[in-house]
């Protein structure tokens, strides 16, 4: 028997969480593969935990206080999962709608000792929304361009964490998510650290599900947005909070980290003065 521990976290979107769990429970799994779901409900007040237990009683529901965000919730789910000694770990955002063969497709890649990263499309389209990244610009020390599925597994430089499957041995090699990176940068940081440790990151040959992109991540790069709103966007937990961005740039940008640290904040201030010429970072 192969056990995959599915790690999820949620906050106040009951219908979305239940829909994601419904698609997960409908997977066409290979023989002798079992899913064990660990969901951290981070202080929801809309009855998410109760709805999950009523509709999916097999799910292990853990509680948070509303301050865990994605990283803290995933780490809490992971801690409970590791005590059961699974063979694989799988990150799954609660707004991802998996195709029926998604887990089987991811597992086929992860069996190679790799981090299997699921390519996701915008709902109702064939356009990529989340997945992997390539470092396509020489001299830029972190990835900038989204990888498109190509019909076969392809090497990538880092990843979004919306749906990712890897052997527990990778967790030992790559370490844990950095709890200081509370939400927006933790997945890309983890992908870069795994690659540095010699663990291959591979994107699925095709899309494995859908997930709507989040435009708020780049709101500070829109010259039509008022300055005060751009500043709030870049400093928010979904943007680039300075303490967390400092950790990321010092870790991954080498001696040029000060340049990359100040860049987004300068762009936020100047983008309205130079419309069309200044773009936010890819993160």
Image (cartoon, rainbow, N blue to C red):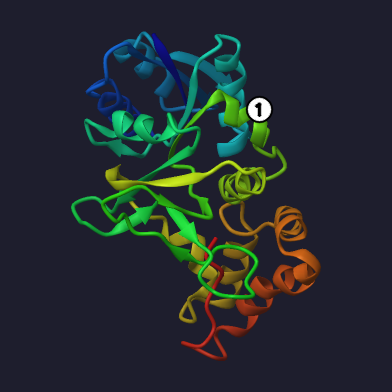
Where residue 273 appears, as percent x and y from the top left, is: 57, 91
22 horizontally vs 281: left or right: left
Q: Say above or below: 208 vs 87.
A: below
193 horizontally vs 131: left or right: right
Q: Which residue: 58% across, 31% down? A: 170
Where residue 225 appears, as percent x and y from the top left, is: 49, 76
Q: Which residue: 26% across, 24% down? A: 22
116 horizontally vs 262: left or right: left
The image quarter in which residue 64 lies: top right
- 3 vs 25, nearest the viewer: 3
Q: Say above or below: 180 vs 31.
A: below
Q: Say above or below: 7 vs 273.
A: above
Q: Is residue 13 visible?
A: yes
Image quarter in which the N terminus is found? top left
Where residue 130 appears, as percent x and y from the top left, is: 39, 52
* Label 1 element class: helix
Where residue 34 appears, as percent x and y from the top left, is: 36, 13
Q: Is residue 176 visible?
A: no
Image quarter in which the C terminus is found? bottom right
Q: Which residue is mark 1?
A: 172
Q: Which residue: 68% across, 57% down? A: 241
| Label 1 neighbour load within 10 Å: few <14, some 14-19, many 20+ | few
- 202 vs 228, nearest the viewer: 202
């Amino acid at each position: 028997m192969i056990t995959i521990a599915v790690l999820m976290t949620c906050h106040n979107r009951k219908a979305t969480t239940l829909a994601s769990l419904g698609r997960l429970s409908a997977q066409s799994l290979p023989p002798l593969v079992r899913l064990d779901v660990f969901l951290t409900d981070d202080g929801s007040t809309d009855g998410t935990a109760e709805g999950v237990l009523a509709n999916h009683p097999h799910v292990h529901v853990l509680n948070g206080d509303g301050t865990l965000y994605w990283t803290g919730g995933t780490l809490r789910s992971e801690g409970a999962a590791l005590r059961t000694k699974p063979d694989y770990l799988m990150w799954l955002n609660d707004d991802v709608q998996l195709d029926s063969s998604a887990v089987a497709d991811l597992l086929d890649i992860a069996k190679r000792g790799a981090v299997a990263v699921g390519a996701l499309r915008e709902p109702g389209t064939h356009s990529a929304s989340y997945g992997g990244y390539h470092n396509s610009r020489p001299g830029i020390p972190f990835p900038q361009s989204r990888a498109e599925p190509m019909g076969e597994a392809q090497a990538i430089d880092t990843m979004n964490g919306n749906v990712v499957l890897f052997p527990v041995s990778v967790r030992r090699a790559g370490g844990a998510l950095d709890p200081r990176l509370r939400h927006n940068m933790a997945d890309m940081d983890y992908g870069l650290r795994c690659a540095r440790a010699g663990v291959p990151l591979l994107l699925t040959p095709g899309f494995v599900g859908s997930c709507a992109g989040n435009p708020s991540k780049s709101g500070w790069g829109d010259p039509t947005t008022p300055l005060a709103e751009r500043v709030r966007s870049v400093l928010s937990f979904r943007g680039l909070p300075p303490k967390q961005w400092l950790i990321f740039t010092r870790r991954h940008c080498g001696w040029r980290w000060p340049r990359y640290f100040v860049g987004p904040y300068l762009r936020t201030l100047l983008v309205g003065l130079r419309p069309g010429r200044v773009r936010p970072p890819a993160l």
